[in-house]
Amino acid sequence: MSATYKLIRQAMLDGKSLSLVYHGHRRSVCAHVIGKKNGRPQVLTYQYAGTSSSGLPTGGQWRCMIVDQIQRVEVIDGQWKTDHNHNQAQTCVDQIDVELWVGADGKPYVKRA
């Protein structure tokens, strides 16, 4: 398990947001699911600020990221964010290590770890 994976995983368990660089773009995200897809570590995030090559819609967008391609990860203060469709099935991760669920209060709770 890489240091990046461990940092993202711990931020999830602590319900914290992250600032990171992915494909050359600084992004603010909240990680929802981390594990592996086809043996490769991946994380499903909700990006709510920053930039990307495809742009960022108002309010944010779901992003599936390959953990080994993430750089300069920092845990940041701020409200944990998600989207109204957070309970839809995801295809980013097929071997789940940690998964967060959103409570009625809008806060993240560990569903699986």
Image (cartoon, rainbow, N blue to C red):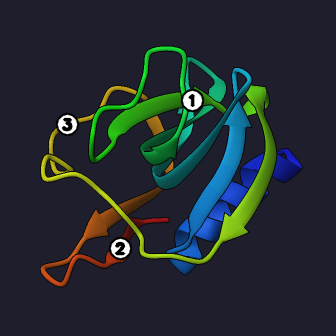
Helix, strand or loop under label 3: loop
Q: Residue furthest bottom?
A: 105
Question: In this rendering, is residue 97 above or below 77?
Answer: above
Mark 2 or mark 1: whose residue is earlier in sequence: 1
**Where residue 29 appears, x then y in whole percent?**
51, 51
For the residues marked 3 and 2, what is the alpha-carbon distance in whole angstroms?
17 Å
4 with respect to 85 (left or right):
right
Instruction: Locate residue 14: give its quadrant.
Output: bottom right
**Residue at the location (22% across, 51% down)?**
83
**Residue at the location (77% across, 51% down)?**
73
Helix, strand or loop under label 1: strand
Q: Which residue is mark 3?
A: 89
Q: Do labels 3 and 2 touch, CB within 8 Å?
A: no
Say if residue 93 shows up in the picture. Answer: no
Q: Which residue is mark 2?
A: 108
Q: Which residue is mark 1?
A: 65
For the residues marked 2 and 1, what is the alpha-carbon distance in whole angstroms?
20 Å
